[in-house]
Amino acid sequence: MTTQLWTDAVALEAVPDEDVMAAAVLGRELAFYGVDGQVYVTDNICTHGHARLSDGFLEGTEIECPLHQGKFDVCSGKAMCAPLTVDIRTYPVKIENGRVYVDLGDI
Ligand code: FES
């Protein structure tokens, strides 16, 4: 059994509906997505180049990178199209008392 190590990240009300925002958590740059009342969290820097996904365009559960228009599924982190070849890291999320907690794992 693995133990989750939750870090208090941001206020739930700060995460925009059907959009993305960036926040640094313990020095790690993360992207927070509001999708259908759920919150998903990924690394913010694209796996293809140095672009911030928080500057991209969220449509449904897909974030489009602003630099070369690669798309990731924000739920699974899966790279959905060229030029992406590497998935983006996702993080477990829990919501408690109006706060968003993330498990950063072994960073
Ligand atoms: Fe994101 Fe190229 S930097 S697709």
Image: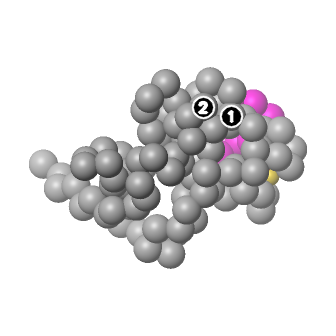
Asked where in the image residue 84 lies, by quadrant, the reply is: top right
Which numbered mark, 2 or 1, is in the foreground of this view? 2
Is residue 81 inside the magenta stretch?
yes
Q: Give 88 or 32, whichever is nearer the viewer.
A: 32
- In the drawing, does residue 104 fall left or right of residue 35? left
- In the drawing, does residue 52 fall left or right of residue 35? right
Mark 2 near mark 1, Cβ–Cβ under 8 Å?
A: yes
| Residue 101 picture location, percent across and down | 33, 54
Q: Give 3 or 83, whichever is nearer the viewer.
A: 3
Q: Residues within 10 Å of mark 1 (few under 14, many from 20)?
A: many
Task: Compute the Cα span from label 2 to label 1.
Answer: 7 Å
Amino acid type of the residue that numbered disc 2 sits on in the rendered structure: Glu
Q: Is residue 93 above or below residue 36?
A: below
| Local SS, label 2 | loop
Q: Is residue 94 above or below residue 78?
A: below
| Residue 61 picture location, percent across and down | 59, 28
| Residue occupying the point 53% across, 68% down | 24
| Residue occupying the point 50% across, 51% down | 14
| Residue 26 picture location, percent across and down | 44, 73
Q: Which residue is mark 2?
A: 18
Q: Quadrant of the C terminus?
A: bottom left
Asked where in the image residue 73 lies, by quadrant, the reply is: top right
Q: Can residue 11 be seen here?
A: yes
- In the drawing, does residue 74 fall left or right of residue 5? right
> In the rendered view, how is the structure colored?
one colour
